[in-house]
Amino acid sequence: MSEQENLEKLLSMARKLKALAERGVGGEKDSAEEKYNEYIKKHNLHDSDINPEMNRRVFTLQDSDYQDVLLNVILSVNPFTKHSSTKNAIQCYLDHEDFTEATQKFEYFSKMLRIEKELLMTAFLSKHREAFEPDTHSKKKWRERRVENDAFEIKRQEEKIVKQEINRQKADKMLGADVTTKVMDSGDRLKIAAFNQDRAGQLMAILLESKYVRSRTKIGKE
C-alpha cells in the first residue's frame, strides 16, 4: 500500500469516528469523541485533514504573470492539492504549514520577478535606444509647439496673477495697507529621462546574491 493510500485509509476511519461523535448522545457521544481525539493524535492528524474545507485558500491577483508564479509555488508545496483558477484568483487547499510555506515562497519569487522584469525592460530600452530617440522633424515640430504652448500658459498664468494682484491691491487699499508688487519667475521645466546604470547594477546584485531558502523544517502532508 502506498503512502497516499495509507493516508486515505486513516482519514476514512477518522471521518467515521467523527461522524459517530457528532451523532452520539450523552455518554455515547463522549466516548466517541474521546476515541476520535485519541485516533487523530496517534496518527498525527488534524481536524483540517478530516474536513478539507478548513484548508480552503483563495488568493486574489490581478497580474497574470504573478498568478502563474503563485500556481507553480502552490504545486511545489503540495503537488496533490485540488485547485482551480479564474481570471483574478486561485483557489486551492493547503494546511497551515503548507500555506505558510507557499506565502513565504511566493513573496520571495514575486520580488525576483519584479526585479527581472525591470531589468528586462531596462535592457530592452537600452538596446533599442536609437529607435526611441525623436528624429529631427519631431524635435523641431514639437519644440515649436512647446514654445507656443509655454508662451500661452505663461500668458494665462500672468493674466491670472494680474487679476489676483489687482484684487489684492484693492483689498490692501481698503484696509490702508502698503501695496507691494509680486514677480512671477518662470523657467524651463523640461526634464529628460536617462538610462540609470546604477539602478540596473543594484537590481542585478540583488538577483546574484539572492537565494530561496525553504522555511518549513518538516515535510508537510500531501
Image: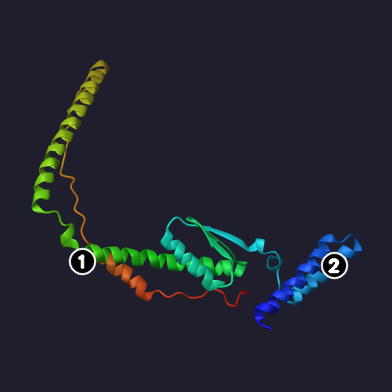
Q: Is residue 136 above or below residue 47?
A: above
Q: Amino acid at mark 2?
A: Ala
| Mark 2, secondary structure of its residue | helix
Q: Quadrant of residue 120?
A: bottom left
Residue at left offset 48%, top offset 55%: 88
* Quadrant placement of the N terminus: bottom right
Residue at left offset 85%, top offset 67%: 32
Q: Is residue 69 above or below residue 152?
A: below
Q: In the figure, is residue 7 to the left or right of 69? A: right
Which residue is more in the foreground, 215 or 68? 68
Q: Earlier in the sequence, mark 2 or mark 1?
A: 2
Q: Position of residue 96 (x, y in %)?
A: 61, 67
Q: Position of residue 25 (x, y in %)?
A: 89, 60
Density class for disc 1 (Cα within 10 Å; few <14, some 14-19, many ≥20) is few
Q: Position of residue 94 (x, y in %)?
A: 60, 66
Residue at the bottom extreme of this rendering: 1
Q: Amino acid at mark 1?
A: Lys
Q: Which residue is mark 2?
A: 32
Q: Which residue is mark 1?
A: 127
Q: In the figure, is residue 34 to the left or right of 207? A: right
Q: Is residue 44 visible?
A: no
Density class for disc 2 (Cα within 10 Å; few <14, some 14-19, many ≥20) is many
| Mark 1, secondary structure of its residue | helix
Using the numbered discs, state the Cα–Cα distance from disc 2 to disc 1 in whole angstroms: 71 Å
Residue at the right extreme of this rendering: 27
